[in-house]
Amino acid sequence: MSNRYSNEKGFTGLEAAIVLIAFIVVASVFSYVILGAGFFTTQKAQETVYRSVEQSTTNVQLVGNVYGLASNTTEGIDQIRFTIGLVPGTPYIDLEKMTVIVSTPAFGPKILAWTNESSSTKDTNFIALKNGIGNSQSTMAPGDQTEIQFNVTSVPRDTRITIEIHPGVGASYPFSKTTPSIIAPNNLIY
């Protein structure tokens, strides 16, 4: 027997609408997840680019001359001083993470670490004096000029000295200078 009130055409339309809404909800959630993953990947790629640019460029530069002091002029230069500054665009550097590597033909590379003492008495440390005065500073801000001082094993006349500055972040800054032919108590190293 057939029931005159049983019309299934309305239920089929309602079921189709529910299925359509379910597909739209699932597609919306799926697209939200895909977009979120895309935004996350883009952000990580951007961070990687900024970090690589920061690390590939040097942060420090030599400002002025390099000087050598000799406590005994017959033995050679036993202390080196020079001033560094920040490259434009560098926010600051942590001098505690910086190292200085010094070498000559007579002695191999020596790695010098930062110290907070007021003067460098060993040949394993360097001090960093803001504008050449005061106590050793641990950070360097834009506009600062920091004098680096360190002791070395006596370097005789006409000897090439290679110095490499390794900031905590960024490329190293190497330079070479030669001691003068006549050693005086204060020397300009060329």
Image (tube, grey):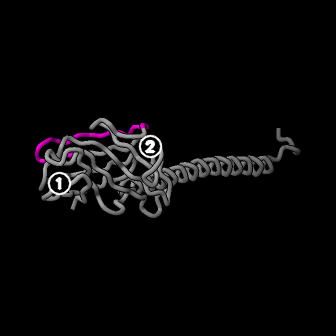
Q: Looking at the rendering, in which quadrant would you find the C terminus?
A: bottom left
Above or below, 115 relative to 104: above
Label 2 element class = loop
Residue 51 appears at what percent x and percent y? Answer: 43, 52
Q: Is residue 116 visible?
A: yes
Q: Amino acid at mark 2?
A: Ser
Q: What whole-number distance in Å separates the C-alpha atoms at marks 1 and 2?
A: 28 Å
Q: If you read the primary sequence from the N terminus, does the residue marked by circle 1 or circle 2 appear first?
A: 2
Residue 22 appears at what percent x and percent y? Answer: 69, 46
Q: Amino acid at mark 1?
A: Ile
Residue 170 appears at what percent x and percent y? Answer: 37, 52
Per the rendered image, the range of residues in magenta is 102-117
Q: Is residue 138 visible?
A: no
Label 1 element class = loop
Residue pointed to by mark 1: 183
Q: Is residue 107 magenta?
A: yes
Which residue lies at the image location 76% right of the left edge and 52% below the top edge? 13
Residue pointed to by mark 2: 136
Left or right of residue 179: residue 114 = right
Residue lying farthest right? 5
